[in-house]
Image (cartoon, rainbow, N blue to C red):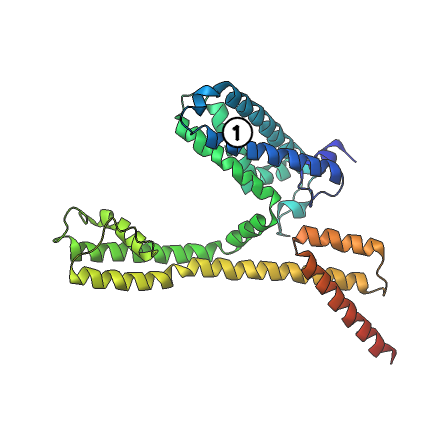
Amino acid sequence: MSLQTTCYNILASYKDAQSHHNASKYFDVILVTVIVINIATMMLSTVPGTSSQYSTELHIIEVVSVALFTLEYVLRIWSSSAAPSSALTSSKDIQFNTPWQKRWYYLKSPMALIDLLAILPFYLSMFVTLDLRILRVFRVLRILKLGRYSRSMQTLITVIRNESHALIAALSVLMLFTVIAATCIYYIEHTAQPDAFSSIPASLWWALVTLTTVGYGDIVPITPGGKMFGGLITILGICFYALPAGILSSSFTAQMQLKRDRFKETVRTVLEDGKFSEHDANHLERMRALLDLDEEEARLIIRLLQHHHKNDTREKDT
């Protein structure tokens, strides 16, 4: 096994690693711990007096963290050439002819961009003066690095990617409807409240808050027509703003069902020879962990398919 392959398996999530599982597990624990410490220090640095009192300690934590994240980022790019094509893309149409093609494809992935944004501001601050608030905002992005170790987060990213066209269409309709609502309320309420509804852009805030049924109450219509229109917009907002949630939830459910179907296929393949050895049980457990299925659900699937397999075998014998 080459050094690149070894490095890739250690850096990969414990559930994705094809070898060196213990080393990958320890590295995951270390990296997650560092990310959590980073988020905690970022939050503490906003407490009055803490930043000045513990400035040295906070700076040391930041430097050590950035050094580790930088090393991780460089090694991930370098070892991505050893990654199987299925780990980089689910599309069978994309072919990688050279190692640098794999590296370039990895560099464009969401997790690689998050890794870059997590360290880039630190190095930019060495050459240009950056607002401290900007640095803190980018440090918050480091929490997104935890998405690499969360199957649910990865599934959600897959859902958003698969439903991107439908989501864009739904959001476009919502934006159009928000503009229409802002325009109508402006003409209804402007005369009665010229300060609150001073323009259509200013009315967009009311339209957005009302359509999402948040209702902060800082700007409210006072005319009978405005109140009736506000009630209508609130009802329509429940319908329109449920579209993206419905798209995401249905696709998320479909993804989970796809995982169950894959696990069932694996169980059927294992049961084809009529035996269920310890090796088969370990293989199914790894597959369950990889698909992030519940243990009780996986055991139920195995028992049901074993029962069906026995019945099918008896029918064939008779």
Looking at the image, the residue that sits furthest to the bottom is 318
- Quarter of the image with the N terminus is top right
Q: Observer-nearest residue: 73 or 31?
A: 31
Q: Is residue 2 above or below residue 15?
A: above
Counting from the top left corner in percent of width and height, residue 198 is at 17, 47
Neighbours of disc 1 within 10 Å: few (<14), some (14-19), many (20+): many
Q: Which secondary structure lies at badge 1?
A: helix
| The quarter of the displayed image where residue 271 is located | bottom right
- Residue 203 left/right relative to 123: left
Look at 70% across and 35% down and name the residue there.
Answer: 26
Look at 81% across and 56% down and name the residue there.
Answer: 280
Q: Is residue 57 above or below residue 224?
A: above
Q: Observer-nearest residue: 108 or 155?
A: 155
Q: Observer-nearest residue: 293 or 312?
A: 293
The reply to whether residue 281 is visible in this rendering is yes
- Quarter of the image with the C terminus is bottom right
Question: How many numbered discs sit on the rendered protein?
Answer: 1
Q: Amino acid at mark 1?
A: Ile
Residue hosting label 1 = 119
The reply to whether residue 127 is visible in this rendering is no
Counting from the top left corner in percent of width and height, residue 98 is at 67, 38
Counting from the top left corner in percent of width and height, residue 40 is at 51, 33
Looking at the image, the residue that sits furthest to the right is 317
Counting from the top left corner in percent of width and height, residue 172 is at 37, 55
